[in-house]
Image (spheres, helix red, strand yellow):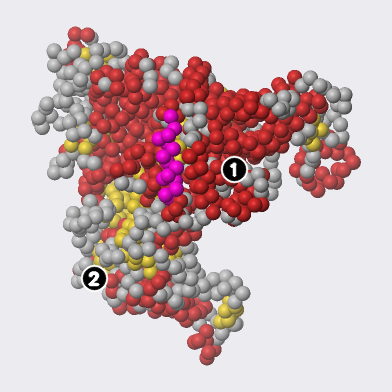
Amino acid sequence: MSRLVKKSPSLCTDLPLDNTVICNKLQLLRQLLKSCFGPTGRLKQVHNNIGGHVVTTSTSSVLLPAISSSQSFINLIKTSILNHVSRFSDCGLFAAILCLSLIEQAKQSGLSGSVAIGVNKHLLGLCTSYLQREDCGCKVKLDFCSSHNLITLASSIISSKPACVLTESEVLHISKLAVQAFLLTVPCNSPGDVSLGQTVSISVEGHPVLNSAVFPGLLVDTPDDLCLDKSENQHSNPLRLVLFSASLAGDLSELGDGKIDMHPGVDTDSQILDQLLELVKRVVKDEVKVFVCQKVIHPVVQQYLKRHGVIVIERLGITLMEPLTQLTGAQPVATLNTTIPAKAYGKVKDLSILQFGSKTMLHLQPPGESSICTMILCHRNETMLSELKVACQKTEHVLRLTLREPSALLGGGCTETHLAAYVRHKSMKEVTETVSALGCSRTEHLRGVDGFCRSLESVAAALEHDGGDSVMDLTHAHHWTRPADVMKEQEDSSGFCGCGLMESSPNQRWTYLNTNYQEFSPAPLSGGAAVQPRVLDSFTAKLNALQVAVETANLALDVRYLIQDMN
Amino acid sequence: MCAFQGAGMLPVEHLHLEHVLQTVCVLESVVRRSFGPEGGQVLFTQDTGRAMLSRSGARILTALRLEHPLARMVVECVLKHSTVTGDGSKTFILLMASLLRIIHTTACKEPNVSHAYNSKAAAEAAAARHLADKMLAFALEELHDLIAVGVVPYGSCLSWEDFTTQTQLQAHANNHCVQNLLASFFHSRLGRTHCDLMSNLTCELLTHWEFENDLPSSSLHFVKDNLAALHTPVSGFPISCSRLMKGQVIHRDFAAPCPRTDRQPVKAVVFTGFLQPKLLRAEEVLELGCGEEGKQRNIVQFSAWAERSLERVIANLQRLGVSVLLSAVKQSAAVLALAAQAEMSVVECVSEDELSLFARLSGATPVTDCWMIEPEHVALLTFCRPILLGAHRYVHVAFHDSEERVTVKPCSLVICGLGEGQTDQYACALRDAIRMLLSTWEPTGVTATTASERTRQSNTSTSFHTDDQIPNAAPFKQCVLEPGCVIAAGGTFEFLLSHALLQHGSSCSICDDTMMGVPAVCQLLANALLSVPRQIYSHSPRRFLLTQTRLLSSVQNHSHPFSLAHKEEHNTILIRVGGDCECPLEEGKLTKHCCREADVSPKAFMSDSGLESVSCKYQVLLAVLQCVSSVLRVDAVLHTHTALHSQSHRRPNASWDGTDDEAED
């Protein structure tokens, strides 16, 4: 340390949740995140003060890191939501809105911190055990025999990112591609532990979205002067490939710290080059047709290889090394003096050149069944493209999560309203036991339950941004929205509920969300397989999001003192 | 906060009793928020901008970055105390504040303001100092006996079986004790919602790490020393996902994609150095010649030699059937490539702690010389596979059972939390819980510093010797708190001790009734102690009174809980403890014996409010008294200026040393 700076004392705040400044900030954050939620959410433009890149987004994983606050409360909530998103890729805004509503509701209910925490934790336990039950009314089993539900799940995620600016048919196209890519990465015929493959995505700007495509195998940037000599390739199929992880530029590496004393007239460079050529000669003799190097290849060596009809790919980069070894079965070579064993060579079935806008790419096709594929994403401009890329990555992750737990939850706010109704009903039934276990009074418990359920309902209501009403039916407790401009008489024609499983019928009874209603046990839908839900959410992600939201809210409610290091 | 600054040449700050009190009261007001069952967390933002939650008193006090030297001194005392016992830092501050308040009021009332002092303040300070010293002297002399007679009988004793027995027969009755103790600890650290989960996990962890033919507390020592290697923090998950995992997690990923091996067992070798020989060391010179002998001195030949030697090492490993290489350093690309070709997976840059734990658990010695790899270097594993925990991929290994360690079931703890701050908090709480258990378990080893001499004697010499040497039997006092003594939480210790103090005071008052006498000191200490339960029940003063009367009435009912016979038994136990500590079986039996006391003690003391360690409480009290007496001995603070400050200070009158300033800039 060149300079010692005296540490300044910290700034302290007592009972921060009673502080109006902090409460206002939390409320502001909630409004901000609420306005981004769902397919009709409003977009946010993020740009920094030095005129950098402008990002248009409504995704929590992009938006939250951009929000920087001096308030440690905001940071606490932000980090735990971001941690959730980085593990599960979905339901970030759900968790954030739920957490902030829970804090606000607990404040409004006037319960003491520890009572509110106890009730919240108890109700969370009710929710998680209900969601994990077989007969849970808002859960759908995923069937891998048909891709229908998988595509629904994918399209729910992609359509919940309005910053991608996609039409309905584009959403469907991208969802299908995402499911296709996902299915390609699942190996079919390996028994025992399965290791999933990889999807490499390449983005191309300025092309219509419908041009996006998925290819089995890898696409790599090609050298400019590549011409495929078809006739030559034909005779040996599959083609032999060698992969080097060491530099072939002719430099000296890993010699150690010692000095090298050179006599005049010694030409080390040419000695090394001779050695490289020796190596390459052996490779050519082994009938290698594709020569790939992670790093740089000496031009003379390249020239030699090309003369012998070998296709040279250099500067592959570390990220493509693993997919390439998986694709071809090659083992990277890093020794220049030892002979390369036959099993270190990999295989490629065929090579072809693909043209995508300005990009020319070499397509390496897998020799047999392979779990590596490449996804090319096209979009009209850069901002939308980057949002689309994020959306596709999340979709891939969420689809992978379904392998562990093949279920999904009803989307469109139906899960939230259903859970709220269930919690109200269940906790009323067990009120005596709960009250004695938690050590609180009946009214305190009631207020706690009400706050929790209202928070859940307010998340469902946050899906509506155009001034419409959010209502819930009183039989299955699904979520419905009514546009603001529809007259009272027409309300029966509101069509389907949020998830699309229920169709409205004239004898249904309704309640507005966040109003009091007589608690009831929400009945599961007895529907046959005829009706498929239109919106599905990831089960694993939502379950964790629910737990994270409640736990974060509990932590925040437990804070009694704030110390801020001012250094 | 106080000020005679800057007026004179050297800023002198005279410390008055009020200032001391004020400083400690400020600390108290911070700590109070997270104290007791109704307490909450303190959220602090570090200078790095990271948000961090804590209920640990030590953590909170360090986060304050206090400036006042006196406050810093107090905080240092707290830290010193809490690194030993892992507990009691909030109680420390509360007790200290209340002691100082009581000393202050007493000193102000002091009637005989002597003419020797030229001001009232000086007289007060002297009286306070005197009082504090008296208290400390009293505590060092008598407190131990008082606790042994007035508190311990109402508590109970943990036995080692509590930690270890898995058998259902007695587990649910006994294991409750340790779990209760841990649960109350975690309650005070993490809040009520997580305390059961964490105490279950800790108990399970300790159970798995039981070394059979070793001293019982060795398991605690082992976990304490290896905690960093034994736990994996995972953020982004709720805490309920925390779990124990069989085997060891090495916190690194495979350097190369690992080939799948179905061979059983998996053989692994640990390397501490480079596999590929370093070609040129710093002091060496490579001479590259030319001409006819150039063939021998070609640079290419030279590196070829290195590669060939590496090949031979790998071939040797292959001969031994090794398929996993663990390395402390980063290996060269050639090593990775050759290992991949030989179907070996490589894990690089493994930390030293993890490697030594691995070596201990597998029984294999790490390789230092690559040319000498023998079968004793080869560790046998049942599996070695990648595991994804949160954002990171780690290596998960499980050990082949060998005869030496059939009892130990190696396992490692996955601590889940919402963010890094939370996992840190949980891990710290776990570490402190282990410390707390250790100091509960081994109260003699960690007694207050002034008593260390006596402790050493009692440990080394047999009881007969000590009897001869020290007629007042001081070593016995050290041992009266037998290992693992616990008492119901919720202020029971304080209520009982203050009661015992008052009784003791009144019994002494016949012979001595001066102002600074034993009765007065007892009275003051008893009052100060009550401030802790008062804080615990601060939300309902009625419960404070209720608890107090309930406890005191049951004390009166059982006016002498120990029969004479029982007392004798006690003494024999003590002798054995002092005499032959190295006999573990004996000790195991002994503690089981002591556990019967739990049945003796009245039910009122075994309420469901949890348990606390008596020895920790005792140590807090001693530490506080020492801190108070040392703080009160300070009468002024001199603010000296070192080079760091001089620059800013000198600037106004810089005319005469302008050159100096330039040099500094």
Instruction: Name the residue at 33% across, 42% down.
Output: B170
Residue numbers of the magenta segment: B588-602
Q: Position of residue A201 (x, y in %)?
A: 32, 48
Q: Amino acid at mark 2?
A: Glu
Q: Position of residue A310 (x, y in %)?
A: 31, 70
Residue identifier under label 2? A232
Viewer can see residue B414: no
Residue identifier under label 1? B477
Q: Nearer the viewer, residue B617 or A84?
A: B617
Magenta-drawn stretch contains A452: no
Task: Find numbered disc 1 in the image and state the secondary structure of the residue it sits on.
Answer: helix
Q: Amino acid at mark 1?
A: Lys
Dominant secondary structure, magenta:
helix
Which chain hosts label 1?
B
Q: Residues within 10 Å of mark 2 (few under 14, many from 20)?
A: few
Q: Nearer the viewer, residue A241 or A398?
A: A398
* In the depicted structure, whether residue B342 falls above or below residue A37: below
Q: Position of residue A323 (x, y in %)?
A: 31, 57
Give the Cα separation between the discs numbered 2 and 1.
95 Å
As drawn, is A170 to the left or to the right of A98? left
Residue B615 sits in which quadrant? top right
Instruction: Name the residue at 40% across, 52% down.
Output: B209
Viewer can see residue A330: yes
Which chain hosts label 2?
A
Residue at the outermost right position: B656
Camera-nearest label, 2 or 1: 1
Q: Position of residue B340 (x, y in %)?
A: 35, 67
